Amino acid sequence: MNYADFLASKRRRPPSSGIACEPGDVDDRLFDFQRHITAWAVGRGRAAIWADTGLGKSRMQVAWADEITRETGGRALILAPLTITGQTVREAAAIGVTVTYVRDQADADALRHVGADRIVISNYERLGKFDPARFDAVVLDESSILKSFSGATKKALVSAFRDTPYRLSCSATPAPNDLEELCNHADFLGVMSPQEMRSTFFIADSRGEFMRYRLKGHAAQAFFDWLASWAIACRTPDDLGFDGSAYALPDLVIRDHLVPTGWTADGQLFQTELKGITQRSQVRRETLDQRVKTAVSLIEAEPDEQWIAWCGLNDEASAITRAVDGAVNVQGSDPADVKAERLLDFAEGRIRVLVTKPRIAGYGLNLQSAARMVFVGLSDSYQDYYQCIRRCYRYGQARPVHAHIVLADAEEVIVRNVRAKEDMARGITSGLIAAIAAENRAELFAGTSKGDDYEPRAPMRVPAWLTTKEAA
């Protein structure tokens, strides 16, 4: 064995644990790229789909569960944020698949009598009410819920489905600005343990926070190759070699509004840069009236537009709701069916102004009926910021989207922090897709001409002695 072969033998590639599936086996109501991705994930058995917002992850995960359960005769459980369970049920019906919302294992078992128990869906908060052993397949929708290596939710999900044969995780932003978080999906899927991932690809970062890790420089390509063996990542179908023209979006216009407030921290004579969570919380509460007034003026300036007002505090949401005629506040204390009904009413144009929080409606929902939104303040979470914007700025949006960021002037540091994370996220996403696209394409198009990575860059010149007089 030569040295190159020796190195190749050391490459970590998880064995396929899935079921043979061709794109033609998948429902033709899915787009071509969706059928290829779904067939690949069925073939892997345990896989991750990291497709950007609007690319149809709901339909792909439903089609995956449908193929798996048809072949095995088993049952599948989809776990999702509460607010998008109803949307997933409707998306499933659009491709001819029955998915039923259930509250617990008893609900799921009761469906067996009517033959509707093959694929069920529930929300993450109800995980403890199910028996994982009763399911052959599990799907995590919006799987960015897999947070840190030691997160309680992540530990519960890994433990619950450790023995589940077929697993799928789906997210638009599994780790928008931290490569380490990508590995949490591998732990859930049973590809590699956190300890082994750390020692193989990461090194403790003594320059940053305690217990933080960074990717080893010499391990970068091996890391991306390893990801490509169990995950698909794409921002548009073009990334995987498909026609993405239908996914070209209109303009996105983001405007910052720094409201002059003259705010200073307790004990200070002059305004200085915010320090820590305490001062961030203090300035947000003490400048509420000024920020709400600015946000309301923006909404009232375009009365014919639907608006989303993203709030972080209950008092912000209440103030906006009182100030804007017809505004509807969807809040955490609302019953689940009330939340679902109001969000559907907004999506279908029956509500003009939706007031809510990122953790309630910021993930997974299709709200492209609206093209205006205002952030009544901003947290340091880039993921929340990105996901909220993508509720409207997604496939199917035909108009330019305008997002207004309303902050107190003292909060400018928060804008800079989020924008820095945005730049980092773009770099990581671009690097990830560039590094794994070739292998993803090779697997998706195995046995076809598209699987050939030859790309001609110069015109072919035919020697004169090979040309006929007629051809010349």
Image (tube, rainbow, N blue to C red):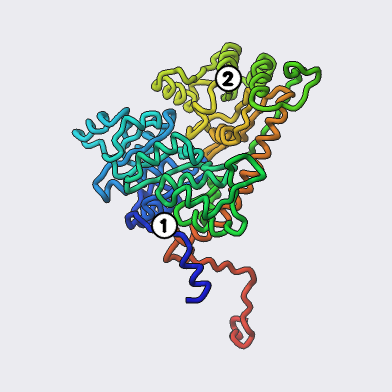
Residue assigned mark 1: 14
Instruction: Kindly identify which numbered label has been placed on residue 193.
Output: none
- From the image, state whether disc 1 or disc 2 is nearer to you: 1
Residue 429: image location, x then y, percent: 58, 48
The residue lying at 57 percent from left, 11 percent from top is: 322
Residue furthest to the top:
322
Count of residue discs? 2
Residue furthest to the bottom:
465
Q: Is residue 196 left or right of residue 277?
A: left
Quadrant housing residue 342: top left
Residue assigned mark 2: 313
The residue lying at 49 percent from left, 67 percent from top is: 8
Q: Amino acid at mark 2?
A: Leu
Q: Nearer the viewer, residue 94 or 155?
A: 155
Residue 170: image location, x then y, percent: 45, 43
Residue 368: image location, x then y, percent: 53, 33
Above/below status of 65 relative to 305: below
Residue furthest to the right:
269
Above/below status of 387 relative to 264: below
The residue lying at 67 percent from left, 37 percent from top is: 419
Label 1 Cα neighbours within 10 Å, binned few <14 / some 14-19 / many ≥20: some
The span from disc 1 to disc 2 (Cα, nearest Å) is: 44 Å
Mark 2, secondary structure of its residue: loop
Quadrant housing residue 326: top right
The residue lying at 54 percent from left, 42 percent from top is: 175
Q: Is residue 241 left or right of residue 153?
A: right
Mark 1, secondary structure of its residue: loop
Q: Amino acid at mark 1?
A: Pro
Residue 301 is at least partly visible in this image: no
Q: Nearer the viewer, residue 392 or 14?
A: 14
Label 2 Cα neighbours within 10 Å, binned few <14 / some 14-19 / many ≥20: some
